[in-house]
Amino acid sequence: MIRENQYLEVEKSVNRILSQGLIFDQLTCELEKLISHKYGALNVDTNPAVININDWKKEDIEFLVKEYSGFSNESIHLFYDALIHLEWDGVKTEVQRNLAEEMGSLTKGVPHLVLMRRGYKQELGVETEGVQYSACTEQLLNKMRTVFRSSNNAYLCGALLALEATATFEFKGVEKILRALKHRIDGGEINADSLTGEYILGHVADGPPGENPEDDHYVGMRSAIGTYITPEKGEALTKGFVAVCTALNAWWENITIEIYARRLDFAASL
Ligand SMILES: [Fe+2]
Ligand SMILES: [Fe+2]
């Protein structure tokens, strides 16, 4: 049960990757493998919340959804922070395209966060407005804000790339969590035409390439960034990428521990 070992392994892998002085395409390929092989919480089949969801009570899942909404609410601001600090026009254009989607370009003009807030409240009974987050969620948000306010453009691009590289399976995990909550509430399903259904479909769809918004973001971001990253900038890019993956992976671990710790809260069990 000593989990820092896995992060020391990440560091070793990162040092090995950096020692090779790779060109951008090879580097991104190695970074993708790093997520698959080293970050258990960033893969749907091994994410600690997703694999334990069947053992959790409705209150546990409600708590998780509320906490996760903190990150969802923050992500549009992270994109704006990046936009403010970016000097590379091609990447700025890609971030702006992403922001337009957040504001509703693919969801009938309704911003993603409006769909999320209303859907969570009306369909899942989870309030996400004016709520307090637990310490580990605040820690994640603070870390992300610091990373996305970096003035080193290569570092910032690494962070943006990581956000998109992790988004598809993160959303697939969140979809499973939301469906599990709906099932606990009334045994029902989340319909595609519901607010939450539209929110999910605005991010992940089981369609062919080009019809899955988050995969599309990753491909778009990778090609926009590739123009600017020379091998000398590879180290900064890698550090930004790994900083985001580490913060997200640690949050999923911490929030899962928090859920078990809450069950031991004496007052809550009375
Ligand atoms: Fe979104
Ligand atoms: Fe995205």
Image: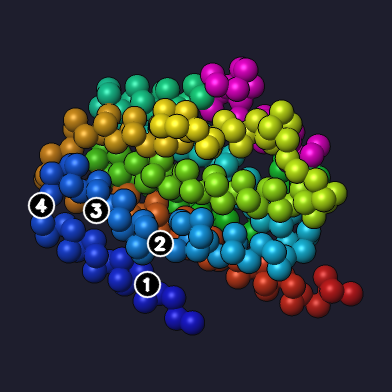
Q: Residue at x 76, y 48 (%)?
A: 182
Q: Is residue 7 magenta?
A: no
Total of numbered circles in the picture? 4
Q: In the rendered structure, which amino acid carries the disc numbered 3?
A: Glu
In the image, farthest residue toward the front: 208
Residue 105 screen position, x and y as percent: 54, 19
Decide which of 267, 97 is in the foreground and name it: 97
Q: Which numbered marker is on residue 227?
A: none
The residue carrying mark 3 is 30
Question: Mark 4 Cα within 10 Å, few/some/many (few <14, many 20+)?
Answer: some
Residue 165 screen position, x and y as percent: 39, 44
Residue 20 falls left or right of residue 142: left
Question: Can residue 132 be seen in this snapshot?
Answer: no
Q: Residue at x 27, y 22 (%)?
A: 89
Which of the 4 quarters of the picture holds residue 120? top right
The residue carrying mark 2 is 39
Q: Residue at x 73, y 61 (%)?
A: 60
Q: Which numbered marker is on residue 6?
A: 1
**Residue stretch rendered in magenta on the structure:** 102-123
Cα gap from disc 3 to disc 1, whole angstroms: 17 Å
Residue 110 screen position, x and y as percent: 64, 22
Upstream in sequence: badge 3 or badge 1: 1
Above or below residue 35? Residue 161 is above
Cα gap from disc 4 to disc 1, whole angstroms: 24 Å
Q: In the rendered structure, which amino acid carries the disc numbered 2?
A: Tyr
Upstream in sequence: badge 1 or badge 2: 1
Residue 16 falls left or right of residue 211: left
Q: Is residue 112 magenta?
A: yes
Which of the 4 quarters of the picture holds residue 269? bottom right
- Callout 2 secondary element: loop
Q: Which numbered marker is on residue 21?
A: 4
Decide which of 232, 19 is in the foreground and name it: 19
